[in-house]
Amino acid sequence: MGGRSGSLLGMERVCSQCRAVIDDKTLADWCPACGGALVERASLPETGGAAAEVDHRGIVLPRRHALGGIITPQ
């Protein structure tokens, strides 16, 4: 698959089983963590700050605040 179409630019890929967010650059049809199917959903608005941290499997890691704790959406 090449690039994404213009209508999918505001979308992100999420595992339907473990809810891991997959990086746009990761070329996979299945979740690298659990093997679940990937689904497209509207991406959350960016709050600025540092770029998202991605692990070696292509999974976007949760953001952290200055003290190191994980920031979870409410």
Image (cartoon, helix red, strand yellow):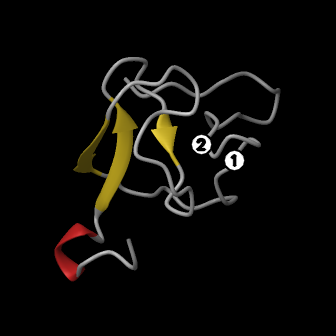
Does 8 sit above or below residue 16? below
Drawn side of residue 47 relative to residue 63, left or right: left
Between discs 1 and 2, the one toward the N terminus = 1
Q: Is residue 1 visible?
A: yes
* Circle 1/circle 2 CB separation < 8 Å: yes
In the picture, the quarter occupied by the N terminus is bottom left
Q: Name the residue at 56% across, 62% down.
A: 48
Q: Which residue is mark 2?
A: 60
Does 27 sit above or below residue 28? below
Looking at numbered disc 1 in the image, what kind of residue is underneath it?
Answer: Val
Quick one: 55 or 27, which is closer to the camera?
27
Residue that extends furthest to the right in the rendered view of this protein:
67
Instruction: Give the x, y percent position of residue 63.
Output: 64, 38
- Disc 1 versus disc 2: distance between alpha carbons? 4 Å
Instruction: Give the x, y percent position of residue 30.
Output: 43, 37
Q: Name the residue at 80% across, 36% down.
A: 66
Q: Name the residue at 56% across, 63% down.
A: 25
Drawn side of residue 66 relative to residue 24, left or right: right
Q: Name the residue at 48% across, 30% down.
A: 20
Drawn side of residue 40 relative to residue 68, left or right: left
Instruction: Give the x, y percent position of residue 17.
Output: 35, 18
Q: Secondary structure at mark 2?
A: loop
Residue 54 numbered tag: 1
Does 42 sit above or below residue 35? below
In the picture, the quarter occupied by the C terminus is top left
Judge the density around disc 1: few (<14), some (14-19), many (≥20) Cα neighbours within 10 Å: some
Q: Secondary structure at mark 1?
A: loop
Drawn side of residue 31 relative to residue 59, left or right: left
Instruction: Give the x, y percent position of residue 22.
Output: 50, 44
Quick one: 64 or 35, which is closer to the camera?
35
Residue that extends furthest to the left in the rendered view of this protein:
7
Q: Is residue 44 visible?
A: no
